[in-house]
Image (spheres, grey):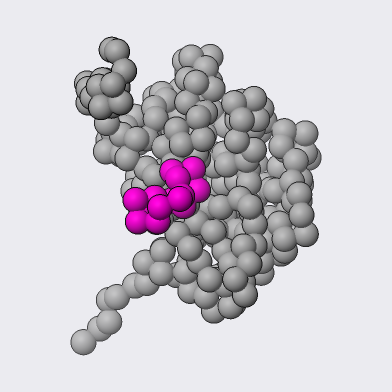
Amino acid sequence: MENRWHMSVFLELLSLYEDNGITVQTSLSPGHFPGFGSQDIPFTYMFRDGQQLCEGGGIAFAEIAFLEHLFSAFQPERIFVVGNAFGWSTLALAIMNPSARVVAIDSCPTETEEQGIAFANEMGARLGRDVRAAKGKSPEDVPSIIAREMGGPVDFALIDGWHTNEAQRADFEACKAVADGRCVYVFHDVINLLLADGFAAIARDNPQLASTLLFRTPSGMAISYPPALEAEIGPIARAFTETDERVRALWEEGRARRGEAT
C-alpha cells in the first residue's frame, strides 16, 4: 500500500532544530508555568546546552496553523521577514511555500543572531528552498536588501521586528515601499506586546487594505490585505479572530471581574 503520510510543517520544522542539537520550547501556557506571562512563554525559543540562543522568539504552533490556512488560499512568490532571530519563522514560511523566495533580515544585536542568519541559510539549502537571510536593519536597509536579494516586489511580509508602535509603523512603511499592490502583511505580537493602537493607526491610514486583529492567535497577530483578495483571505482571517460583539462582551466581562466600572 502506498504511504500517503507527509510530515507536517511543525514536525519538519522541529526536526531541523532537534537534529542540530537545539532544544525547542514552544506554545506553552502561562497557566501551566506560574511566573511566566503572555508576553513570553507562548512563543518559540531555542536552547543549546540549557542556554537560550536569542532573546527574540518565533511564531507559535497555532500561528503556524493560521499561516498554513492562509497559504492554502494565497500563494506568495516573494516573502519578506523582518526579524529572523534564529530562523524559526523564516524556515516555517519556506516550508509552507516551497516555490517562493524567502528573504529575511535581522539587525543581529548579538553574535547569536548572526548564527541564526547562518542557520536559516544552511537549513533552507538543506530543504531545497530559496532562503536568503541577511544582516540588516529595518527600515534603513530594507530597500537595498530587497533590491539585491528578492528579484521583484514583495507579495507577503511578516513583520516581527522591534516591538514598539514606532518600529512597527516604520517596518510596515518599509515593507509597503518594496511591495506590490497585492501584498499581504502579517504582524506578530500585536496584542500581547501592546501594539494594537499602533496597528489601528496603520489600518486607519491605509484604507486600501482590509485590516483586522487575529484574537485566536497566541500573540494576537494582525493582518492587512488588499480587498481584491477578500474571497480568498477573508474567511481565514475571520476564522482566527472574534466578532466585534464577542470582543466587546469579553472586555466588559473582564472589567467586571477586575471590579472596574464599565
Q: Is residue 212 left or right of residue 204?
A: left
Depth check: 176 or 60 in front?
Answer: 60
Depth check: 42 or 146 in front?
Answer: 42
Depth check: 233 or 215 in front?
Answer: 215
Question: Is 15 covered by the magenta stretch?
Answer: no
Q: Quadrant of residue 21?
A: bottom right
Q: Is residue 236 left or right of residue 88?
A: left
Q: Quadrant of the N terminus?
A: bottom left
Question: Please, which residue is most extreme toward the bottom here?
Answer: 1
Q: For the magenta stretch, what is the residue range?
A: 28-42
Q: Position of residue 228 (x, y in %)?
A: 39, 27
Q: Position of residue 48 (x, y in %)?
A: 62, 71
Depth check: 51 or 23 in front?
Answer: 51
Q: Position of residue 92 (x, y in %)?
A: 49, 58
Q: Quadrant of the C terminus?
A: top left
Q: Residue at x 49, y 43 (%)?
A: 39
Q: Is residue 103 left or right of residue 247?
A: right
Q: Residue at x 28, y 21 (%)?
A: 259
Q: Quadrant of residue 251?
A: top left
The answer to whether residue 120 is visible is no
The answer to whether residue 191 is visible is yes
Q: Residue at x 74, y 46 (%)?
A: 107
Question: Is 40 covered by the magenta stretch?
Answer: yes
The main secondary structure of the magenta stretch is loop
Question: Please, which residue is most extreme toward the front here?
Answer: 259
Count of numbered marks: 0
Q: Position of residue 221 (x, y in %)?
A: 44, 37
